[in-house]
Image: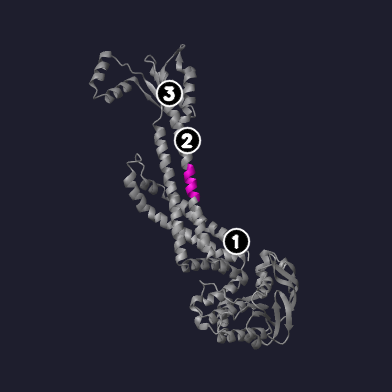
């Protein structure tokens, strides 16, 4: 296509949009709703990921060492565990730190503190808190801990206990819940995205349907298919760009309002901050979705009217 | 120039045209008459390759129209200027843009468009309505714009399907005069009509179709139904 034809297609596409009146306005409105749904899905996905990560971070396995295990031996174990690919991080808590934390936790419970004093010394073990990258990996980490030769000195194990067994059921359930939430969340996102895209497609089809006689005349006048299609695609793209700009504008007050109302519900996740921090990526997602929706819907919708 | 060779067109069991053989020479003015449903419009649709014949062939300048691939149809249609009873102007384009569209479609330059469209608007006596949209024009004005669009690319053939069907007598007369003038300038014209006055005013070859068959072919313009 030469520059002259390209320019004509652009100008005609713009004129068709500007003169489209109610049809153009309705198409922009529906496309705006579609893109708003897509934007909401981005926020929902982010919120879901944030929530699941927060829950995941609360899950760990603690390895308690016998009181005779030296700090050096525990650190050797820590080094070994940290080298495991499935481990996110390992935190060491000394017996003294455990005691201080215990006392702080039971500061209001004089009876417990009195019992502790009567015992004399520090009855608490040093421990390693192990956090896996994925909760499903805890089983393999525990298996490693139970079979690792580094955990024994002179044939005697330096591990007092591992709290995995009593947490296993909770961890397994949580793992399943996280996985199910991710899968269901993904399916819902895809379903809504498809539904909203279909609505946008139907609207563009309807807009082009109103021009079907016009398309037939263009064919009979001798216009090529690409010359007929071009302006409709341009109109579709303009619709998509305007709709995405509208959504990007509306998201500022919407996320600010939603952010102030919901930040406390989602343990600190603010949609407004998320929008501000990820503006460029959301901008591209919406703009690209708008352009693709407008262009592809126009191409598909016009095809059936070109067989004159 | 045009040759219908034993053309039959059926829609299901219904035959719209049956074994039509007809030829049209260059620069002829042919009026096709017949009752509603006689097959006049089907004949034109076959010529424009809007429809394919069930049997037989339609030739335009030795080209079998039905052999043209879909991708080449628009080149073929550029040789024909089409005028419809219901005008079929593009509603969101002005009178000027409707005529210019036919030129844009064939890839004519902006300079050519800027010089030819005003000339054609003068020719159809609508220079003052250049920027009006179709809904701001009368029936006669719309049809004159449609004729302007049909002739702007100087086609070899102008086909008019009931061009005066929606017009009052004064506009009918004007349209017929324009079509006669186009023919005098060397363009082949084929029109379909019910209107005896049009046939009499044209005074050229008349082909009568009845129930899908050619029943008369008179050289001197007689309206007998």
Q: Position of residue A299 (x, y in %)?
A: 56, 59
Foreground tag (3 vs 2): 2
Inter-mark Cα distance, 1 to 3: 63 Å
Q: Residues within 10 Å of mark 2 (few under 14, many from 20)?
A: some
What label sits on residue A179 in the rendered view?
A: 2
Q: Is residue A53 left or right of residue B188?
A: left
Q: Nearer the viewer, residue B73 or A130?
A: B73
Residue under disc 2 on the same chain as residue under disc 1: yes
What label sits on residue A100 in the rendered view?
A: none
- How many labels were placed on the picture? 3
Q: Residue at x 35, y 21 (%)?
A: A94
What residue is pinned by disc 1?
A304
Q: Which residues are magenta?
A: A186-194
* Label located before the other in sequence (3 or 2): 3
Q: Is residue B18 left or right of residue A162?
A: right
Q: Are marks 3 and 2 in contact (CB under 8 Å)?
A: no
Q: Nearer the viewer, residue A34 or A76?
A: A34
**Colouring method of the image:** one colour
Foreground tag (2 vs 1): 1
Q: Main secondary structure of the magenta part?
A: helix
Q: Which chain is mark 2 on?
A: A
In the displayed structure, would residue A53 be above or below residue B55?
Answer: above
Q: Label 2: state its secondary structure.
A: helix
Inter-mark Cα distance, 3 to 2: 20 Å
């Amino acid at each position: 296509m030469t520059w002259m034809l390209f320019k004509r297609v652009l100008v005609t596409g713009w004129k068709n949009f500007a003169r489209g009146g109610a049809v153009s306005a309705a198409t922009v409105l529906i496309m705006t709703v579609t893109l708003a749904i897509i934007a909401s899905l981005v926020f929902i996905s982010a919120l879901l990921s944030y929530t699941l990560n927060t829950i995941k971070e609360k899950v760990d396995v603690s390895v308690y060492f016998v009181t005779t295990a030296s700090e050096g031996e525990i650190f050797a174990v820590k080094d070994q565990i940290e080298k495991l690919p499935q481990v996110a991080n390992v935190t060491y808590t000394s017996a003294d730190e455990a005691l201080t934390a215990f006392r702080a936790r039971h500061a209001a419970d004089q009876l417990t503190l009195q019992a502790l004093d009567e015992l004399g010394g520090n009855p608490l073990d040093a421990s390693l808190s192990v956090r896996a990258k994925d909760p499903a990996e805890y089983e393999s980490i525990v298996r490693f801990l139970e079979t690792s030769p580094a955990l024994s000195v002179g044939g005697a194990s330096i591990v007092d206990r591992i709290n995995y067994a009593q947490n296993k059921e909770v961890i397994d359930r949580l793992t399943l819940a996280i996985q199910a939430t991710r899968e269901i969340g993904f399916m819902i996102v895809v379903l809504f995205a498809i539904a909203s895209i279909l609505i946008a497609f139907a609207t563009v089809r309807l807009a082009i349907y109103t021009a079907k006689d016009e398309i037939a005349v263009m064919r009979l006048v001798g216009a090529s298919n690409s010359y007929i299609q071009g302006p409709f695609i341009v109109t579709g793209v303009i619709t998509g760009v305007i709709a995405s700009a509208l959504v990007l504008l509306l998201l500022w007050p919407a996320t600010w309002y939603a952010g102030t109302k919901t930040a406390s519900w989602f343990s600190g996740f603010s949609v407004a901050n998320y929008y501000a921090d990820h503006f460029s990526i959301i901008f591209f997602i919406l703009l690209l979705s708008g352009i693709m929706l407008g262009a592809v819907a126009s191409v598909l919708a016009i095809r059936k009217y070109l067989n004159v | 120039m045009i040759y219908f060779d034993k053309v039959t067109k059926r829609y299901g069991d219904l035959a719209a045209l049956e074994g039509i053989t007809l030829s049209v020479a260059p620069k002829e003015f042919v009026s096709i008459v017949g009752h509603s449903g006689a097959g006049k419009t089907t004949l034109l649709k076959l010529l424009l390759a809007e429809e394919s014949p069930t049997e037989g062939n339609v030739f335009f300048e030795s080209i079998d129209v039905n052999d043209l691939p879909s991708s080449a149809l628009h080149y073929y249609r550029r040789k024909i200027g089409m005028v419809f009873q219901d005008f079929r102007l593009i509603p969101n384009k002005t009178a000027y843009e409707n005529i210019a569209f036919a030129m844009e479609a064939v890839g004519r330059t902006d300079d050519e468009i800027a010089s030819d469209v005003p000339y054609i608007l003068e020719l159809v006596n609508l220079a003052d309505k250049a920027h009006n949209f179709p809904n701001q024009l009368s029936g006669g004005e719309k049809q004159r714009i449609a004729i302007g669009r049909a002739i702007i690319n100087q086609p070899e053939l102008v086909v008019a399907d009931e061009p005066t069907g929606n017009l009052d007598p004064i506009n009918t007369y004007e349209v017929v005069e324009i079509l006669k003038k186009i023919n005098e300038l060397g363009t082949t014209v084929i029109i379909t009509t019910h209107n005896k006055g049009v046939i009499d005013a044209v005074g050229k070859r008349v082909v009568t179709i009845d129930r899908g068959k050619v029943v008369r072919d008179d050289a001197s313009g007689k309206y007998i139904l």
